[in-house]
Image (tube, rainbow, N blue to C red):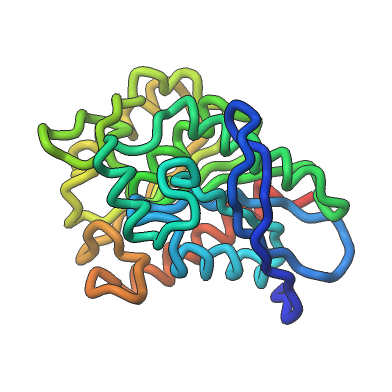
């Protein structure tokens, strides 16, 4: 069911170390219990395209929130400037991300329309963080959209300096949906294969979908990377996955 009337606003929530951080939220205005979605922005930051995704989830009947993971690096800055600062520091530390995402999930569950179920979704660096959220947090579903370095280590000089998470696959606590382009380099098809083998070996609940003719960022409708056919199919996979795991 699609919702014509939604409330979208910027709020302050408590994140890692009880810091107050900025977040963008959207939710339907009708009553009734519903699941919540933590949207994890890509490396380019807390930008207008990410906020559009938050609103899209509200239209589709979910309470949604995206925290500004760069709030501390460059509070109030233009998203491009904030992202540049974060890149210079190698990205957001994993422990801090987990604290911020936990705060976002807590905020969603505090809403009177929450049914208590929360999913996460991330794009690019956020895809890896969505996987991390399924290791560390009480979430009921996680969506990894071409998250780099779940498997493999960033090359020297890469703007994201993080450790792989593949050796923690046994700790996965939530069903995982993975959406990948076969023309991507980070993650490459071989790295996706490696992760899938680990998920199979450890008996995890997952589904992967891979798209020919698509590379990194194929969801980005405002960039040449956009692949409309593949993107629309991927959105349909997301609606089905969350419908299964976040509904009452």
Q: Based on the displayed image, in which of its 4 quarters is residue 243 positioned?
A: bottom right
Q: Decide if residue 105 is on the left or right side of residue 205.
A: right
| Depth order, front residue of 128/231 | 128
At x 69%, y 60%, the residue is 62
At x 61%, y 45%, the residue is 119
Can you say whether 230 is above or below 108 in the image?
Answer: below
Q: Decide if residue 97 is on the left or right side of residue 163.
A: right
Can you say whether 132 is above or below 23 in the image?
Answer: above
x and y percentages locating residue 91 in the rendered image: 33, 38
Can you say whether 181 is above or below 3 in the image?
Answer: above
Q: Decide if residue 206 is on the left or right side of residue 182.
A: right
Which residue lies most toward the bottom here?
Answer: 4
Q: Based on the displayed image, in which of its 4 quarters is residue 201 positioned?
A: top left
Which residue lies most toward the left here?
Answer: 156
Please say whether residue 139 is visible from this viewpoint. no
x and y percentages locating residue 101 in the rendered image: 57, 38
Please say whether residue 70 is visible from this viewpoint. yes
x and y percentages locating residue 166 in the rendered image: 33, 24
Q: Decide if residue 156 is on the left or right side of residue 227.
A: left
x and y percentages locating residue 21 in the rendered image: 59, 44
Query: How many marks on residues?
Result: 0
Identify the image quadrant of the N terminus: bottom right
At x 48%, y 25%, the residue is 95
| Depth order, front residue of 159/144 | 159
At x 46%, y 69%, the residue is 48
Can you say whether 160 is above or below 210 in the image?
Answer: above
């Amino acid at each position: 069911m699609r919702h014509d009337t939604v409330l979208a606003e910027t709020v302050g929530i408590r994140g890692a170390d009880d810091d107050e951080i900025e977040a963008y939220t959207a939710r339907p205005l009708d009553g009734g219990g519903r699941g919540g979605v933590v949207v994890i922005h890509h490396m380019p930051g807390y930008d207008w395209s990410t906020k559009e995704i938050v609103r899209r989830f509200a239209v589709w009947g979910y309470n949604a929130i995206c925290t500004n993971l760069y709030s501390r690096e460059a509070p109030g800055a233009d998203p491009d400037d904030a992202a540049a600062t974060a890149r210079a520091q190698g990205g957001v530390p994993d422990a801090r991300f987990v604290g911020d995402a936990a705060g976002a999930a807590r905020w969603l569950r505090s809403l009177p329309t929450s049914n208590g179920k929360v999913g996460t979704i991330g794009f690019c660096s956020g895809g890896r963080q969505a996987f991390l959220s399924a290791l560390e947090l009480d979430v009921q579903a996680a969506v990894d959209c071409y998250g780099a370095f779940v498997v493999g280590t960033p090359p020297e000089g890469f703007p994201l300096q993080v450790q792989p998470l593949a050796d923690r696959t046994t700790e996965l606590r939530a069903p995982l949906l993975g959406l990948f382009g076969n023309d991507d380099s980070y993650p490459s098809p071989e790295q996706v294969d490696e992760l899938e083998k680990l998920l199979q070996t450890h008996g995890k609940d997952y589904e992967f979908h891979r798209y020919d003719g698509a590379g990194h960022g194929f969801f980005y409708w405002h960039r040449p990377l956009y692949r409309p056919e593949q993107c629309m199919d991927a959105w349909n996979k997301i609606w089905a996955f969350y419908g299964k795991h976040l509904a009452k």
